[in-house]
Image (cartoon, rainbow, N blue to C red):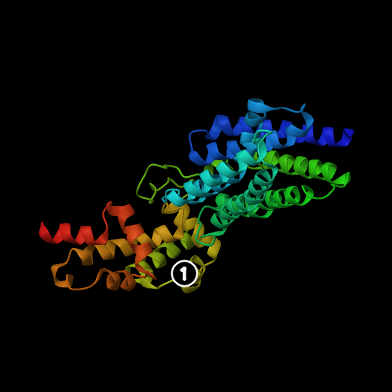
């Protein structure tokens, strides 16, 4: 095996262990942190596997299982990183279980198993892996504009452009070179790329922005209410920020939240403010991590009042949802249930019969 490949692979593995140790110490209590550790462990074994002697049976399965879990763990990490209030979907667990159930036999069937069956399982496992990684990338991209946490926005961008792209390339290359000879330069190129990515990640995580990941993760994963406690600002609001806060509160009091599809960029234009200044104001001084959840507080407040009003009992729930700024009933129901732990219909029935 080429010395350059061994050197760069060893470098990448050492950096991965360093990053995993940092995460285990600082972020093991959070779901996103634990799933990221699984991603790093799987990547470690993926890079280390070609340097180890051939293994068979249970040992081979134990070495390969973390690798198998990487695409699913990446999706789960992306979800827990970006979703402050939504649980991981049940159908997502089914896809994860199906992917593992197909991938494990594809690489560990007994020798007497039919080769065509193993080939079929292998071919099926590749699009499943791609699907899980793509689901993670979509999760990172979804609501990117409405994310108010600057550190998390930067982390999303880095994961989308670097880590996600790397994983997609590796999966596609694996499939391609399973059916044709691999050029001798490809493993070395891969080892160099992996070591550079690991170095960049460790530099960012340990030196340039050691608190960025902690700031990005949800502070209270068990809270059903996505509004965070108002943080104590390190500095008081300056006159311009105070004026902006007053304009923001006045705009919302006048029903500005009812505008369907309102984005942070549009709101900044309406208030004649810079977008990043408005983001920081809502995040750091009002305590919200997501712009949609900030809007939901006003929308659900109004909807709750109207649903409890006997004079409006004749109005369909959908009408109230549309009036308060929602595009459809589904997101309104989800936001309402997070707040009251009841559906709008159940809430109305309870309020009107008390």
In front of the other: 213 or 351: 351
Q: Residue 239 at what x, y percent from top left?
A: 46, 60
**Residue at horizontal 62%, vertical 43%?**
103
Is residue 102 depicted above or below 306 in this figure?
A: above
| Most foreground residue, 156 or 233 | 156
Left or right side of 297 for 25: right
Rendered position, 216 above or below 327: above
- Whether residue 327 sits left or right of residue 122 in the image: it is left
Q: Relative to residue 118, is residue 82 drawn left or right?
A: left
Image quarter where the N terminus lies is top right
What residue is rendered at 45% in x and 64% in y? 244
For label 1, the SS is helix
Q: Quadrant of the C terminus?
A: bottom left
The image position of residue 306, as x and y in percent, is 22, 67
- Binning the other alpha carbons within 10 Å of mark 1 as few (below 14), some (14 to 19) or many (20 upward) gives some
- Residue 268 spot, x, y in % from top left: 49, 68
In the rendered image, residue 297, in percent from the top left (x then y), is placed at 34, 59
- Residue 260, relative to residue 65: is it above or below? below
The answer to whether residue 41 of the structure is visible from this angle is: no
Residue at left offset 34%, top offset 63%: 332
Q: Nearer the viewer, residue 255 or 226?
A: 226
Can residue 343 be seen in the rendering of this structure? yes
Check disc 1 and report the residue beneath it: 267
């Amino acid at each position: 095996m080429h010395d350059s490949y061994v050197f760069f692979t060893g470098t990448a593995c050492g950096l991965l262990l360093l990053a995993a140790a940092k995460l285990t110490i600082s972020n093991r209590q959070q779901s996103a942190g634990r799933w990221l550790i699984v991603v790093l462990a799987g990547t470690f074994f993926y890079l280390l596997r070609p340097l180890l002697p051939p293994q068979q049976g249970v040992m081979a399965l134990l070495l390969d299982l973390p690798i198998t879990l990487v695409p699913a763990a990446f999706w789960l990490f992306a979800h827990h990183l970006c979703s402050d209030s939504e649980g991981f979907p049940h159908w997502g667990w089914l896809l994860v279980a199906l992917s593992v159930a197909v991938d494990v036999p594809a690489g560990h069937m007994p020798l007497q198993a039919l080769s065509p069956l193993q080939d079929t399982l292998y071919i099926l496992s590749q699009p499943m892996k791609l699907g899980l990684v793509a689901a993670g990338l979509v999760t990172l991209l979804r609501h990117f504009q409405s994310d108010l946490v600057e550190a998390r926005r930067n982390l999303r961008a880095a994961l989308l452009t670097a880590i996600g792209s790397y994983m997609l390339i590796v999966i596609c290359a694996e499939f391609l070179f399973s059916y044709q000879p691999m050029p001798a330069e490809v493993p070395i190129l891969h080892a160099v790329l992996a070591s550079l990515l690991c170095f960049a990640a460790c530099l960012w995580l340990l030196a340039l922005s050691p608190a960025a990941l902690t700031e990005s993760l949800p502070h209270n994963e068990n809270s059903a209410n996505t509004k965070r406690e108002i943080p104590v600002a390190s500095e008081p609001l300056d006159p311009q920020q105070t004026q902006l806060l007053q304009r923001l509160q006045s705009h919302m009091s006048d029903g500005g939240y009812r505008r369907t599809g309102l984005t942070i960029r549009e709101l900044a234009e309406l208030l004649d403010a810079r977008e990043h200044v408005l983001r920081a104001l809502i995040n750091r001084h009002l305590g919200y991590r997501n712009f949609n959840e900030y809007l939901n507080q006003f929308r659900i407040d109004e909807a709750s009042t109207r649903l409890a009003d006997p004079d409006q009992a004749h109005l369909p729930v959908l009408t109230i949802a549309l009036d308060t700024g929602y595009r459809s009933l589904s997101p309104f129901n989800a936001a309402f249930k997070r707040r009251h732990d009841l559906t709008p219909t159940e809430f109305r029935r309870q309020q009107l019969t008390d």
